[in-house]
Amino acid sequence: MENINKDVLITEANYIDDSLSALQTFLDYKLDTNVTTDDINQIVSLVNAIKLLTKKHAEEMESTQFED
């Protein structure tokens, strides 16, 4: 098992939070305008990036021992 400290967890959580914030900002802006196919592709790309971040984080948590 891998040891991990709280700073790494906080950093990873911030990456996920920032990604979700970017998605929310993008959707808030785009939903007030005409949505194009390119816009939809960008939304899908953001969602896929967030999914990869969360999957990586979850896999690391499954094999981690926590340090204080």
Image (tube, rainbow, N blue to C red):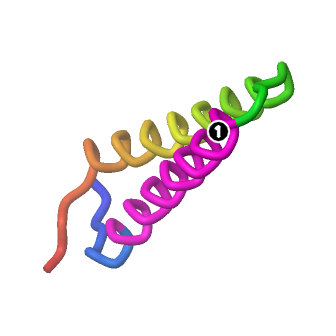
Residue farthest to the top?
A: 37
* Closer to the camera in the image, 1 or 15: 15
Image quarter of residue 36: top right
Does 30 sit left or right of 58 as displayed?
A: right
Residue farthest to the left?
A: 68
Residue 60 within the magenta-colored segment of the rendering: no
Q: Residues within 10 Å of mark 1 (few under 14, many from 20)?
A: some
Q: Position of residue 3 (x, y in %)?
A: 28, 66
Q: Is residue 6 above or below residue 3?
A: below
Does 61 sit left or right of 34 as displayed?
A: left
> Residue placed at 37% from the left, 60% from the top?
13
Image quarter of residue 23: top right
Q: Is residue 35 above or below residue 7?
A: above
Main secondary structure type of the part rendered in magenta: helix
Q: Position of residue 31 (x, y in %)?
A: 63, 33
* Closer to the camera in the image, 12 or 18: 18
Q: Position of residue 49 (x, y in %)?
A: 61, 40
> Residue placed at 36% from the left, 48% from the top?
60
> Residue placed at 52% from the left, 46% from the top?
24
* Closer to the camera in the image, 4 or 52: 52
Q: Is residue 7 above or below residue 27?
A: below
Which span is picked out in magenta?
A: 9-32
> Residue placed at 44% from the left, 36% from the top?
55
Q: Which residue is mark 1?
A: 46
Q: Amino acid at mark 1?
A: Leu
Q: How many marks?
A: 1
Q: Position of residue 42 (x, y in %)?
A: 75, 34
If the image is split into quadrants, where does the C terminus sit? bottom left
Does 21 sit left or right of 42 as displayed?
A: left
The local secondary structure at tag 1 comes to: helix
Q: Is residue 9 above or below residue 32?
A: below
